[in-house]
Amino acid sequence: LQADHQSKYFQDLKKEYQYLSGKYNLDPLYNKQFQFFRLRPNNFPTIRIAQLANLYFMHKTLFSKVLNVKNLKDYYAIFSNGTSEFWNIHYTFNTISKRSVKSLTKPFIDLLLINTIVPLLFVFGKRSVKWNEEKLFDLIKQIKPEKNNIIRELNKLNINAKNAFETQALLHLKSEYCDKHLCMQCAVGNVLLRKK
């Protein structure tokens, strides 16, 4: 918010930021800190920050809600929020764009659950008496398998995962065995080497 734009939305944000930065001694973020190059517009930092801000605005007790979710569908409902109307016609503060609702996609929410929510709840659960970690295993088993370069390479070897629980296991095997050249200590590595 260091630049100066004329829109009422920007001016309101700037005014709110000035108040909060004085109250909480916040350090400003500069444009140079944000990476836009090689990103799809929906992944621009401005959009992701706007989505996070809207998520917090819509769910002030987010952690509490996340703790009490009963199924995957409820997680999708919590995280499927979009942005304010301003961001539906902007990707940055500077330029108006064609209208596009900027809500999180299911694959993005899946990654958010796998890489943030499940580990957070797992750590929280270790400190809680009433927590059932089987609930987390059930959740991650409901999520579709991840799609990334490592999983694609394993698929070429006819190693296929049915869900995110299995892709996480495969990623762990790769980092703990493949990357350390411990093929003979790995059950999967042994099978693959015997086939050759």
Image (tube, rainbow, N blue to C red):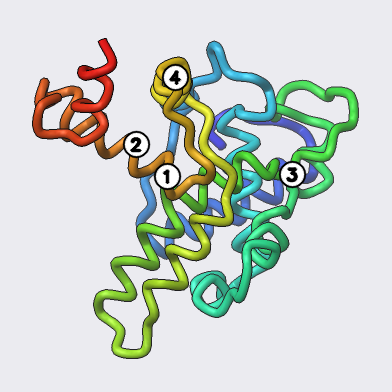
Q: Amino acid at mark 3?
A: Ser
Spatial separation of the CA atoms under disc 3 and disc 2: 30 Å
Q: Residues within 10 Å of mark 2 (few under 14, many from 20)?
A: some
Query: In the drawing, does residue 176 fall left or right of residue 61?
Result: left
Quadrant in which the C terminus appears = top left
Q: Is residue 95 above or below residue 4?
A: above
Q: Residues within 10 Å of mark 4 (few under 14, many from 20)?
A: few
Return the disc, 1 or 4, that comes first in the chain's sequence. 4
Residue 38, percent across and down?
55, 12
Q: Which residue is mark 4?
A: 149
Q: Which residue is mark 3?
A: 103
Marks 3 & 2, CB-CB < 8 Å contact: no
Q: Is residue 103 above or below residue 53?
A: above
Q: Amino acid at mark 4?
A: Asn
Q: Amino acid at mark 2?
A: Leu
Q: Which residue is mark 2?
A: 170
